[in-house]
Image (spheres, rainbow, N blue to C red):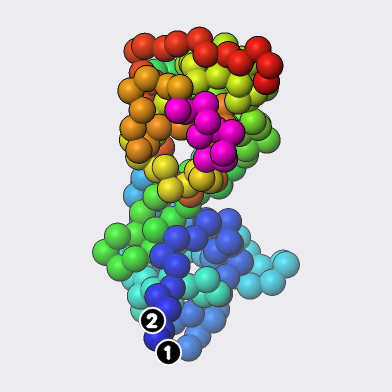
Amino acid sequence: MVKAPNPYVRASALHGNPIVTNDGDTDFEVQDVLVDRDGRGIVGFSAREPGVFGKRHVGVVPLSGVSSIGPDAVMVKAGSVTDPPDEDDRLGTQLVGASVVTETGVEVGHISDLVLETRHNATRVRAVEVDPAKLPYSREGQKGSILEIALGNGVEIDHACGGVCACSTCHVVVRKGIESIPEATDDENDQLDNAPGLTPQSRLACQSVPDGTQDLVVEIPSWNRNLVKEDH
């Protein structure tokens, strides 16, 4: 069975890759990704001459001239490299360092890279990467847990035991993306047994550490109960 190629690639991974025409010519390399004004659509690639001393941004390959985007090269139609970039287009590297802000106005970090979807007729900026080391953590619960990230971004979740898996007050319901969180331990399940309104998607926020492969939708129940075990 032939495995389908990964349709997602970091923009930085394409920098320096050869631009190969259908005729086999390799006169240019990828200098950068060109994105539209809102930063979501890919309009093409900025091209440079190969080598350390090659000229930079000598032309543009519009998306309409791109045949395929692979991990090692960008295939284009012959004669696709045109004039320098349009003033309205932005280089992907110009977005690196920009703030990532939630709909509620909470800054969660800064862009470290763009993640591109390269499927035919679906080429776009699919996501942005944020350096995990620079996320605003609260230092409550396990490192990188839902509780720690939520508190670090001003979202209150009760955690009477201090986030050490000794109560069920940080009970949350993971409505989407629960597959990206490791399965609950026996200790976590023991505490969840004491939580009201238990569901198959219930987890303790202090113990749930998503791996970042999926978006999460987390519901915080309106009720809560302090069930700290004094002998924990």
Seen as rendered, the residue at the extreme bottom is 23
- In percent of width and height, residue 182 lies at 53, 46
Assign a secondary structure to mark 2: loop
What amino acid is at disc 2? Ala
Q: Quadrant of residue 110?
A: top right
Q: Residue at x 52, y 40 (%)?
A: 184
Q: Residue at x 34, y 71 (%)?
A: 65
Image check: 110 left or right of 105?
Answer: right
What amino acid is at disc 1? Asp
Helix, strand or loop for the magenta stretch, by majority: helix
Quickly name the residue at label 2: 78
Height in image: 56 above or below 94?
below
Q: Which quadrant: the N terminus?
A: bottom left
* Residues drawn in magenta: 184-193
Image check: 134 left or right of 171?
Answer: right
Quickly name the residue at label 1: 23
Seen as rendered, the residue at the extreme front is 231
Crowdedness of circle 2 by 10 Å Cα count: few (<14), some, many (20+)? Answer: some
Assign a secondary structure to mark 1: loop
Give the camera-side residue of 137 and 82. Answer: 137
Q: Residue at x 52, y 56 (%)?
A: 11
